[in-house]
Amino acid sequence: MLTDTHCHLYLEQFAGDIDDVIRRATEAGVKKMLVPGMDLETSRQAVQLAETYPGIFAAVGYHPTDMQKFSAEDFDKICRLAEHPKVAAIGEIGLDYYWVKENEKQMQQRKNLLPHFELANTVNKPIILHLREENDAEAGDATNDLFDILEPWHEKLSALKSHPGVFHSFNGNLESAKRAMNMNFFIGITGPVTYKKNDSQRDLVRQLPLDRILLETDSPFQTPVPFRGKRNEPANAALVADKIAEVHQMTRETIAETTTKNADRLFRWESHT
Ligand code: NI
């Protein structure tokens, strides 16, 4: 049994065949899928999918590259959605200095993270973090900026302290991974771990303890080998599991079971109903 903890199934790429996509996922052993929103509209769509399909759960919030849509009024609506029993997390939220380079807009990303953190506290649900860095130092340091906001928040947590969230599609270094795991965060691993030239990602994964890894597809993006270039879908979580299994010299079953248990520990799917 596998769990795809990150897939954007409301996007137009799935509009024509969502039933088939979910059937193929089920056949591949993917029993649970977590669909994170990126703004009010997509958060609503994520909740709608969760209401339609028993294996689907939702997360709600504003993606850092969609912050221009953020308003207090719409955020109130996100807060109400967050109480839905099939909303398992707040996300995806975070910092993206790769696509957003203007200082003022980066500041807006940081500022609007805070009410999301507060919301996670209020509804007692973990956060799904998006972190994307620009290699050019002049574009800012998203990693340090994120930890600067995250660590004081985590310090004051009570119920969420042992399972505050996940760094989705992690592509930082081991030092950042350790800093995240020190706060009990999980590390989300996606399709790029299968890419031929991505030895650095495999080296990182090799050094991560298995009880910290979550499986993700980020569908329809980040398609694993051998389907790279095509649309990604949750059934491909099995390919990511295979690569992690190879790197850790374990069976796919062990990886599937462990990452599913990790997801259960973090998202506590049924506890909100
Ligand atoms: Ni995403």
Image (tube, rainbow, N blue to C red):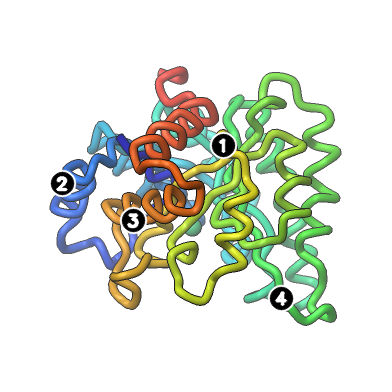
Hey, what amino acid is under mark 4? Glu
Q: Residues within 10 Å of mark 1 (few under 14, many from 20)?
A: some
Which badge, 4 or 3, comes first in the chain's sequence?
4
Report the Cα–Cα distance between label 2 and label 4: 38 Å
Q: Nearer the viewer, residue 86 or 178?
A: 178
In this rendering, the answer to whether 98 lies above or below 9 is: below
Element on which disc 4 rests: loop
CB within 8 Å, label 1 to label 2: no
**On-image quarter of the N terminus:** top left
Could you tell me the amino acid type at mark 2? Answer: Arg
Say which of marks 4 and 1 sits in front: 4
User: Is there any visible trace of residue 55 in the rendered image?
Assistant: yes
Residue carrying label 1:
79
Chain-order first, disc 4 or disc 1? 1
Residue 90 horizontal/vertical position (percent): 56, 40
> How many angstroms separate mark 2 from mark 3 (CA)?
17 Å
Q: Earlier in the sequence, mark 2 or mark 4?
A: 2
Whole-percent x and y of residue 165?
62, 38
- Give the label, 2 or 3, closer to the camera: 3
Q: In which quarter of the image is residue 213?
A: top right
Label 2: which secondary element = helix
Check residue 239 in the rendering and tell me which mark sits there, or answer none: 3
Mark pair 1, 3: CA separation: 35 Å
Look at 55% across and 60% down and name the residue there. Answer: 202
Name the mark on residue 134: 4
Distance between mark 1 and mark 2 Cα atoms: 31 Å
According to the image, label 2 marks what residue? 23
